[in-house]
Amino acid sequence: MESGDVRPATPTTTSTATGKVAEGSGPTRATARSGGDVFGNIFIGIAGMIGAGKSTLAEALGQHLGIDCYYEPVADNEYLADFYRDTARYSFAMQVYLLNRRFQQHQEIIWRGRSAVQDRTIYEDSIFAKMLARTGLMDDRDYQTYVSLFRNMSNFMCKPSVIIYLDVSPEASADRIRMRSRAVESKIELSYLQALHDAYAEFVESISKVIPVIRVDYERFATAEEMAEVIKREYLDASFLRSVTRFDPAR
């Protein structure tokens, strides 16, 4: 990948976590094609729109680097179908459920003390909660409760070493949603994805003050090996400076 394909967005932080993890379970060790100690002890978060390719990249990096891979809870999400059927009714329950599951996953990465890659970070949940509140699909009282809960939980979270943001357009996201044909996603409209893309832009600007972010044009990267080199060049070889030490989901 050429240097023009990525745009690093500021700061530093390190955490812990190493192997491969099935969705909703503890990790099993991946077979490394290149040493998992290439980066020392690193916690990589993959962020991006619905259908951006987070799981695909997370799995490829996990196998290539021989580190733990943690997937977003989808297949066993008890609220997902109800959420898409009646969003306003289940929005708060859905967001609290996801926050709890991702916090459990996030803490497991830290407690295991091995390098890891995570498909969708806990910080991204705040994007969806904020959008639901803005569009009237979540009661303001519920949203304030969610934000307070997130802030309290964040006191116990060690930040990822770096976040890889897969930047795809709303149109590309819609195409990928159609291609993977998940029944629960069939009613997602382009207008929702456009609003989500705007919310991600705000998120990246905010979170990059706390955690290093490498923005990647999804269409232009090809392999896990290439991405590993991107991470090495843009994160390990860079000198980051930051003054903010805490992410605020309400901003």
Image (cartoon, rainbow, N blue to C red):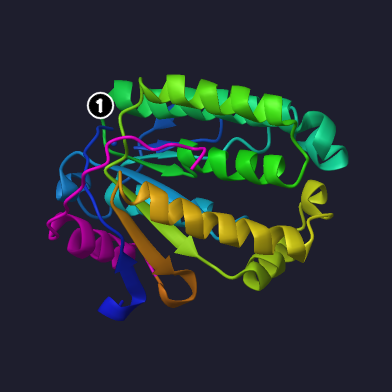
Q: In the rendered image of this protein, does residue 51 appear above or below residue 4?
A: above
Q: Name the residue beneath numbered marker 1.
A: 113
> In the drawing, does residue 214 fall left or right of residue 74?
left
Taking the spot 33% from the left edge, 71% from the top edge, the residue there is: 6
Toward which corner of the image does residue 226 lie, by quadrant? bottom left
Residue at position x 60%, y 35% from top?
A: 73
Label 1, secondary structure: give it: loop
**In this view of the protein, which residue sits in the foreground, 27 or 214?**
214
Amino acid residing under circle 1 = Gly
Residue 118 visible here: yes
Give the image location of residue 84, x and y in percent: 81, 42
Is residue 194 highlighted in magenta? Answer: no
**Residue 229 falls within the magenta-colored stretch:** yes
Magenta region: which residues?
223-251
Locate residue 56, reporting x and y percent.
50, 56
In the image, taking residue 54 as reference, residue 172 lies left or right, namely right
